[in-house]
Image (cartoon, rainbow, N blue to C red):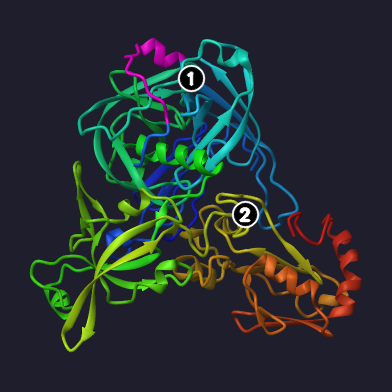
Amino acid sequence: LFRSRPCSPLTALRKSSIAMTGSRPAASKMASKSKGAANTDRKRPRQCRGETENAAAVQAPAVKQTKRRRSGTDVHNSVLKVFVSHVKPNYSQPWCSDAQTSSTSSAWPIRLEDGSLRVITNAHSVEHAALVQVKRHRHEQKWVAKVVCVGPDCDLAMLEVNSDEFWNGLEPLNVRSGLPELQDTVSVVGYPTGGESLSVTQGVVSRIDLVEYAQSGVTLLGVQIDAAINSGNSGGPVVDKQGNCVGVAFQNLDGSDEDGAENIGYIIPTEVLQHFLQDYQRNGFFTGFGSAGIYTQALESPVLRQALGMSKGQSGVRVKAVEPASPAHAVLRPDDVILTVDGAKVGNDGEVAMEWGRIPFNYLMNKKFPGQTCDMQILRSEGDGKSKKLLLKVELIRNKNLVDADAGGPHSKPGSMAPRYIVAGGLVFVPLSTPFLEAAFGENFVDERPAEMPAELLNLLDNGVRESPNHELLVLTQVLASELTVGYSDLEYEVLESFNGTKVKNLKHLAELLDGIQDMYLKFTFVSKEVVILESAKAKEALPSILAQNMIPAARSVEL
């Protein structure tokens, strides 16, 4: 289970920084930080959008394939340039938005199993898009495109272009099934910074491993190559010698503070792409990648293995904890030892053997969809030095953290970025999410840790655990000045615990509690033990004038 934390689009973070390669010209960065056993690190997201030009501030393949070898010219003619106008909400004041920005990136056409034609690019390239246009190689016309599916976890997006003229003569790329081999020669094709025409860089596959995806902080399978991937390459195809697509360019390793690392780029392998496509064709939208919601510990200590009742021939990992929101909470217990996952033996280092090398066992669950199950063989202690083997079916959930990048909340589709808020008697509440933290404290808040940022928020970001599938935290961002709120104006960035004695589950739940209020007072209790009490009748009476004075169009966001 991976924990998330935000990153900023236009600033550098930590060492081992990985830069989003999205829209030109600037590149945003993210860092990976290990914590505990490698296979159970809850990674921090580096949520970012494509870089701005005028910023104002494996399952069955889901693609039809052919065997024809394509020439370099054929491939070049299938690579598209994407133009996006972005309007990003201000998550700290969700009733307004930031100034409009624009960006460019790359894309390419694909034919789905049902024969329909679509365009593939990166999710961060079209994030907060107000308008998306695509242009073909050696064409001057731009066509309007519609975003039909976004997979933020895997940084992929699907576009639709409703124009026969656009598709006339445009050949979809063939998608190669399976993974490339080490030392395979690949070419990155796209429209990076440095010019306006098509660019091609070449390199070899140098590593296949789990990679932290900068867009979401989720760790999924990735392929490392030594070809240059620069700003504007995002969403472009990476092809082999036969012209088949083997992946999608999306981020690179920034070597400025990483011991001189150079030309280390990452591509989304077609295995992940096919998962995204199959998800869309099955559900009509993105649902995510499977996760058991467990925390585990490597068992490389022989003393620890012996204490857990393991024999010399056994290997596995110890369950430290299970997230209460996960179905696994009902079947797994702390100190259980996971021996196998779907028949694959788990090593004491938490890795399983694949044809192309060893990889953390989470990979086996990532290949499945939320709601599917995996078989786990575990060793459970019975006391008195005895233990027994059990074969369990564990239902999987989407990789999701208490504080994550889904601003839309638990009642929206995965990846929703819709801003939400409630103004109650002059108190402004918003969900605690990484977009909010970036808006309130800057996109590099993790490193800079501004003085006004409470340590409690960082602690929840790192260690918060969902208590139920619909659990989200709410933050009091500000108290709007009025006679009603005298004495509370200094309160800000407080995490709400309960309302009138009832523990608040999420923003929708708070709205329901406010609608059903019959008490004389509104009592808001915060995690810090601060309390705000307002008279119910006066709060209702004063609200319209408070909203008008602060030019807030409504007391609640649209979906509430």
Q: Quadrant of the C terminus?
A: bottom right
Q: Which residues are magenta?
A: 63-77
Q: Answer whether residue 190 is visible to the viewer in this image.
A: yes
**81 above or below 382?**
above
Give the secondary structure at mark 2.
loop
Residue type for callout 2: Ser
Viewer-side residue, 557 vs 94:
557
Give how far apart the Cα atoms at labels 1 and 2 are.
40 Å
Q: Confirm whether the magenta stretch covers residue 301.
A: no
The quarter of the picture where residue 135 lies is top right
Viewer-side residue, 554 vs 99:
554
Q: How many marks?
A: 2
Give the secondary structure at mark 1.
loop
Q: Residues within 10 Å of mark 1 (few under 14, many from 20)?
A: few
Viewer-side residue, 158 vs 45:
158
Residue depicted at x 46% and y 37%: 277
Q: Residue furthest left?
A: 312
Label number found at residue 195: 1
- Dot 2 corresponds to which residue? 412
Q: Confirm whether the magenta stretch covers residue 74.
A: yes
